[in-house]
């Protein structure tokens, strides 16, 4: 049962910071691409560029794994793939359930990258009785009434929530009560979970809003370099100002 506390990731017991853990999949993706091209070794500078980080940060991250590379040679690609995969727990099979088989849930079910990365979609679950039995990505959808039994029968510890926002917390609480300890949340809401449950949130609308901010800033910088502010932007600034001429902070709904 949820306690009302919003979960905050803690530093791992082995002493690897969460920021480093968050970058390990980036390194693994870059290394996997090198491995597929049969590249035997890679320098820290090359790998850092491929992963989108600086080389000093990469070397620091790898020091937590006990991997320091060889001067003048670099890192062994295959060994690093193994090291990082083992650290992330990808050397074993992880059964996953996806709850909410609308457009997004169906797209996730059809994603072909799960199996190659150590994850197996064990079940698809939806509350709509009309969906029960329908195959999605070759897997028959099961009704949410059976959620607890499905989780127990398949030994599931990772759940994916792709429901509407209003249903997400109740689904989360049922997943946790059934034994799920890690949740990937695509619903546009913040989940409250008990101690010991990890939640990762993916909010596409927030990411788009951040990109819109950067696009707006780039447009403003372009206008400034031309020696003026576009009339539309000037009108927008005037309309957004408060009664005392200040600029209130507005968060889109």
Image: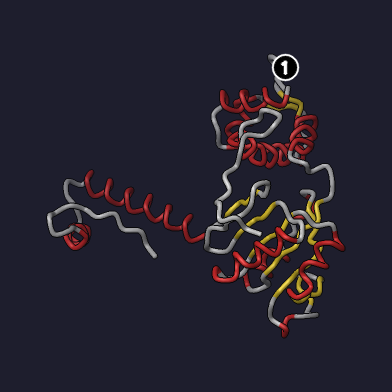
Instruction: Report the number of numbered marks.
Output: 1
Please tell me whether mark 1 sits on a helix, a strand or a loop: loop
Residue 98, picture quadrant:
bottom right
The location of residue 78, given as percent across then percent down, is 79, 32
User: Camera-side residue: 204 or 12?
Assistant: 12
The location of residue 176, given as percent across then percent down, is 70, 58
**246 versus 71 height, above or below:** below
Q: Residues within 10 Å of mark 1 (few under 14, many from 20)?
A: few
Q: Residue at x 48, y 61 (%)?
A: 205
Question: In which quadrant will I find the N terminus?
Answer: bottom right
Compared across the picture, whether 68 is left or right of 53 comes to right
Q: Residue at x 22, y 46 (%)?
A: 224
Residue 81, picture quadrant:
top right
Q: Residue furthest right?
A: 153
**69 versus 125 height, above or below:** above
Q: Residue furthest left?
A: 244
**162 versus 115 height, above or below:** below
Question: In which quadrant will I find the C terminus?
Answer: bottom left
User: Camera-side residue: 149 or 127?
Assistant: 149
The location of residue 140, given as percent across then percent down, is 81, 74
Compared across the picture, whether 107 is left or right of 250 comes to right
Q: Residue at x 71, y 41 (%)?
A: 33
Q: How is the image coloured?
A: secondary structure
User: Camera-side residue: 161 or 63?
Assistant: 161
Q: Residue at x 56, y 56 (%)?
A: 4
Q: Which residue is mark 1?
A: 70
């Amino acid at each position: 049962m949820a306690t009302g506390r919003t979960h905050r990731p803690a530093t791992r017991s082995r002493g690897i910071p969460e920021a480093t853990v968050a970058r390990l999949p980036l390194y693994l993706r870059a290394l996997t691409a090198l491995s597929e091209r049969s590249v035997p070794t890679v320098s820290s500078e090359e790998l850092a560029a491929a992963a989108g980080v600086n080389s000093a940060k990469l070397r620091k991250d790898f020091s937590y794994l006990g991997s320091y590379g060889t001067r003048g040679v670099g890192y062994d690609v295959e060994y690093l793939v193994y090291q990082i995969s083992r650290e992330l727990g990808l050397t074993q099979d992880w059964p996953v359930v996806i709850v909410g088989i609308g457009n997004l849930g169906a797209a996730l079910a059809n994603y072909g990258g799960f199996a190659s990365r150590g994850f197996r979609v064990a079940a698809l679950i939806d509350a709509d009785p009309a969906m029960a039995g329908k195959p999605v990505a070759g897997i028959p959808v099961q009704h949410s009434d059976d959620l607890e039994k499905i989780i127990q029968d398949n030994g599931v510890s990772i759940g994916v929530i792709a429901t509407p926002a209003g249903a997400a917390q109740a689904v989360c609480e049922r997943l946790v009560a059934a034994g799920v300890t890690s949740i990937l949340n695509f619903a546009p809401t913040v989940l409250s979970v008990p101690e010991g449950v990890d939640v990762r949130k993916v909010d596409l609308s927030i990411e788009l809003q951040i990109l819109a901010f950067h696009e707006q800033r780039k447009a403003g910088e372009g206008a400034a370099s031309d020696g003026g502010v576009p009339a539309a932007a000037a009108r927008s600034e005037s309309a957004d100002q408060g009664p005392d001429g200040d600029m209130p902070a507005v968060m889109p709904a």
